[in-house]
Amino acid sequence: MSANDIALRLDDLCKSYGRIRAVDHLSLEVRAGEMAGFLGPNGAGKSTTLYMTTRLVHPSGGKIEIFGHDVWKNFKLAIQYVGSMLETPSFYEYLSARKNLELMGRLRGNVDGKEIGEILERTGLSERQNDKVATYSHGMKQRLGLGMALLCRPRLLVLDEPTNGMDPEGTREILSFLQERVKKDGLTIFISSHLLYEVEEYCDRVFVINNGRLISSGEVKEILAPYDNVVLVSFGGKPPDPTSLMKEEGIEHIESLPGEMFEITLANRDTVWLNKLLLSRGYKVSSIAPKRKTLKEFFLSITGRHDG
Amino acid sequence: MKLPYFGLVVVSILCVLIFVVTGASIDSETLNAWGYTCLSMQLVFTDIGLICIAVFASMLIAEETAFGTARAVLSSPVLRWEFYVAKVLTGLLYTVVITIVSLIISACLGAVNYQFGDVADSIGVIYAQKEVLVNFLLAFFLSWIPLAALVMYGIFISTIVKKSGQAVAVTIGTMYLIDFTKHIIGIDDYIFTKHIGFSWRIFHQVTQGIDYQWTPQIWNMIAMSLIYCLVMFVAGLVIFSKRDFNG
């Protein structure tokens, strides 16, 4: 894989605050053209990692490369490809959205009025573009922050909880827009989020850190692959008594779920066998399908915590 | 955003107040327009003018840090030293502007009651107008040097104190604390604030028709102020470069 195929490489990255290791020998690679989720419990080191990526925080050790350019040795070369929105975006609140974008555009160079207009349109701020940012709601400021990150058509977006404080419709709109940019323009996105369903639905790959260390990573479709031996069954008529089914040799465990649905764990059997068994017992099966893993289950299983 | 304009308004009002209080009470035989302008500039930049400059300088970086806009700028292709130098230049430019505004207003008000002519006495001309003008301009431009040291000091404090209100308080507070105690602890000769107004004091002698001498004291003023400028600039830049901006 060439350097240009890797949008972001973190190599043995460390950050210590006194005795506290916020990031502990973290290494990961985000491929160009993918949307990668960055998960971890509170205090895991996600934000610190993202801050180091944009050189706002000095690492204690390790290396960060963006499209092959070392962020600390070739900052301007590296950062020209990067748009970022870290925590709550900041603006010159006495200026309008347009003025803020023009100002940041001048720092990045080669941003014309047309591009700014497009960004304002895409983020839904066209009508309020000349109003001072101080008058904006939280959601509008999040949109403007995203707009700023998209200035100069970056190749890599680093986002720390970009949909924080936005309504569900706005969240969906923004994430769909970003996903579209990934697919059409080959944009790479490295996104940290507490909302697992966002990562599950929109990301191609996920990295999970805890206590500053990478504890797991993988393609989302592999992580969320169906279980081999767990099926969800719903019944049309009277549901069976779980204790009677438990006597069957091929059934390891049965759990009742809301809505007259059962989760059945099979022992060396498949769904065809189960369907035949249930039908032979006279039960009306309205649906039978393998249970799919959720990102939440995956996350909890590896972190052993209930916050994220 | 309105703070720079507020400073300009304040010094302008002060210039007018000085005219109102002193202009009418001193006759043209005692004072000339050069002397009036010199007096006005000294009075403005003894307290209020200095405070305006110090407040502005001490907010330059602290405000951007507090509001998070420093983070937004530094995560774009702007190096830390570029950001810092831009702030230094902003502070210096503001100092130039505020002194020019004060000078113009003082000079215009001085021209109302007095003359910008030769400095003369009953016997004759002591200093010709051209010589006075040269010394006047010298005094004005040299006055910027210790003010530059003040700007660097304000920016240095602005770098180490993250909140703008606190940065202002620390800058003004330490300035006055040092001013009040420097004679007691014997560090007067080593503090750059001693030299603020020095060039106007020399020029004042010109306007009085008294013998004047720029050297050697002016070299002491320049050296002391530039040393402070350099030390504060380098210290502030190093601290700013090494700082983490993680909210």
Image: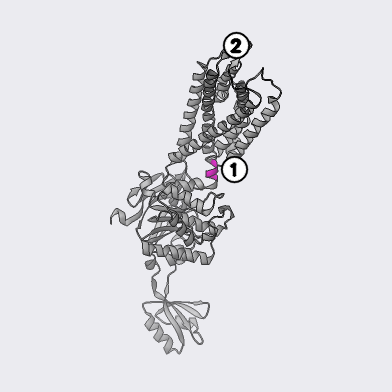
Amino acid at the residue labelled 1 = Lys
Which x, y percent locates residue A287?
44, 82
Looking at the rendering, the stretch of residues picked out in magenta corresponds to B62-66
Res B44 quadrant in image:
top right
Dominant secondary structure (helix, strand or loop) of the stretch shown in magenta: helix
Residue picked out by circle 1: B2
In this view, the mark in front (2 or 1): 2
Q: Residues within 10 Å of mark 2 (few under 14, many from 20)?
A: few
* Color encoding of the figure: one colour
Structural distance between the alpha carbons of marks 2 and 1 = 49 Å
Which x, y percent locates residue A65?
35, 50
Q: Nearer the viewer, residue A283 or B62?
A: B62
- With respect to residue A174, does A28 lie above or below? above
Quarter placement of the N terminus of chain A: bottom left
Q: How many marks?
A: 2
Q: Secondary structure at mark 1?
A: loop
Residue picked out by circle 2: B124
Identify the mark nearer the N-term, 2 or 1: 1
Amino acid at the residue labelled 2 = Gly
Res B132 quadrant in image:
top right
